[in-house]
Amino acid sequence: AQVEPDRERMAALYRQLQALLLQRLPYVPLWYEDHYLVARRDVSGYTLAPDGNYDGLRTTVKNPSPRLAKVER
């Protein structure tokens, strides 16, 4: 991959290498941190992941604020 002149092919080779390393190398977490979630009332959909990743941001939404909602008379 390092000497590949085509950037698309280079990226593909590095992706293959990364997948291979992910399969073969051991992973031992050296520490664990506590995770907390604090959010405003107009934010919903986020869930804490046990491994600490932020994938929950994909489902997080900001809801319209009740104070700013249009009042119909």
Image: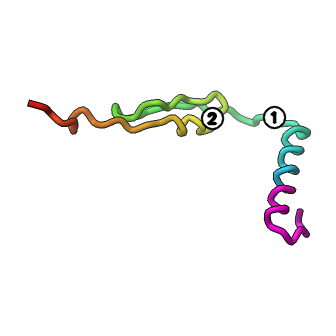
Tags 2 and 1 touching, CB below 8 Å: no
For image coordinates 50% across by 32% down, the residue present is 46
As helix, strand or loop, the secondary structure at mark 1 comes to loop
Q: Which of the pair 58/28 is nearer the observer?
A: 58
Q: Mark 2 or mark 1: which comes first in sequence? A: 1
Report if residue 20 lies within the magenta region: no
**2 vs 1, front mark:** 2
In the displayed structure image, the side of residue 37 where residue 54 appears, left or right: right
Q: Which mark is residue 11?
A: none
Numbered marks: total: 2
Q: Which residues are magenta?
A: 1-13
Q: Pointer 1: what residue? A: 28
Report if residue 11 lies within the magenta region: yes
Q: Residues within 10 Å of mark 2 (few under 14, many from 20)?
A: few
Q: Which of the 4 image quarters holds residue 72?
A: top left
Q: Position of residue 63 (x, y in %)?
A: 35, 35
Q: Pointer 2: what residue? A: 52
